[in-house]
Image (cartoon, rainbow, N blue to C red):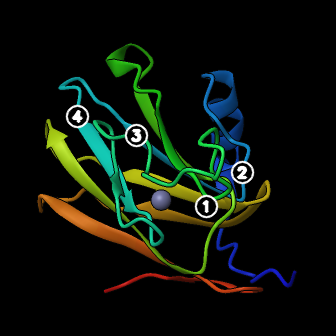
Amino acid sequence: MKMPRLVHDLGTYAWMSLLAVAKGGSVSGGLHLCLSWECGDEETDIDMCMRCPSCNVEVREDNPECGCVSADGEQSIHLLTMDVADTGAAEGRCLENMVVKVPVSGRYTLSISRYTGPPVSSVVSIAQFGHLLAIYRLPPNDAASMTVVHIDCGARTLTLTRPN
Ligand SMILES: [Zn+2]
């Protein structure tokens, strides 16, 4: 599979995937998205959500799995799951993970919204089969929500697009 070269800047944020593992986050899977932000003294809470293009279910904190199931009902090959590892202000940084075991063809759209607290900056990393594809540094968001990236999956391609 030909990988797109979209690694913008590893910088000091390469530790994020390791931190997700340390916090018990699920990082295995075809597609792994990690949202990280500084909680701050006022404990800003940011939430991520993504819609499964196969079952059209929006996965978010209060609905952490999409509706896809396999024939045996055990486990889907394209199950989209979310893993929240918010630790609050004690460690000064919060994490949320989104994992797609085997991406299906179609568009996954990742959005984040600020739930509580003042605007803070955040970082989103996107990895495919453990390889980092892109890191987006997001400025503090005054709006209620913002679309971070469109992930268009084809049979042999994966394209990341940052909408304006
Ligand atoms: Zn689904």
Vertical order, 140 against 154 (above or below): above
Q: Quadrant of residue 90?
A: top left
Nearest-to-viewer mark from 2 and 4: 2
User: Is label 3 in a helix, a strand or a loop?
Assistant: loop
Q: Are marks 4 and 3 in contact (CB under 8 Å)?
A: no
Q: Amino acid at mark 2?
A: Gly
Task: Give the CA distance from mark 1 to mark 4.
Answer: 22 Å
- Residue under pointer 2: 29
Residue at image location 28% in from the left, 29% down from the top:
40
User: Is label 2 in a helix, a strand or a loop?
Assistant: loop
- Residue under pointer 1: 126
Task: Give the CA distance from mark 2 to mark 4.
Answer: 29 Å
Image position, residue 155 (x, y; %): 73, 85
Please name whichever residue, 27 or 19, is drawn nearer the observer in this view of the structure.
27
Image position, residue 135 (x, y; %): 58, 63
Task: Give the CA distance from mark 4 to mark 3.
Answer: 20 Å
User: Is label 1 in a helix, a strand or a loop?
Assistant: strand
Vertical order, 27 against 1 (above or below): above
Q: Amino acid at mark 4?
A: Thr
Q: Amino acid at mark 3?
A: Pro
Residue at image location 63% in from the left, 38% down from the top:
74
Question: Could you tell whether 27 is left or right of 106 in the image?
Answer: right
Please name whichever residue, 105 or 112, is drawn nearer the observer in this view of the structure.
105
Binning the other alpha carbons within 10 Å of mark 3 as few (below 14), some (14 to 19) or many (20 upward) gives some
- Residue under pointer 3: 64
- Residue under pointer 4: 44
Binning the other alpha carbons within 10 Å of mark 1 as few (below 14), some (14 to 19) or many (20 upward) gives many
Question: Could you tell whether 56 is left or right of 144 in the image?
Answer: right
Residue at image location 60% in from the left, 22% down from the top:
23
Nearest-to-viewer mark from 2 and 1: 2
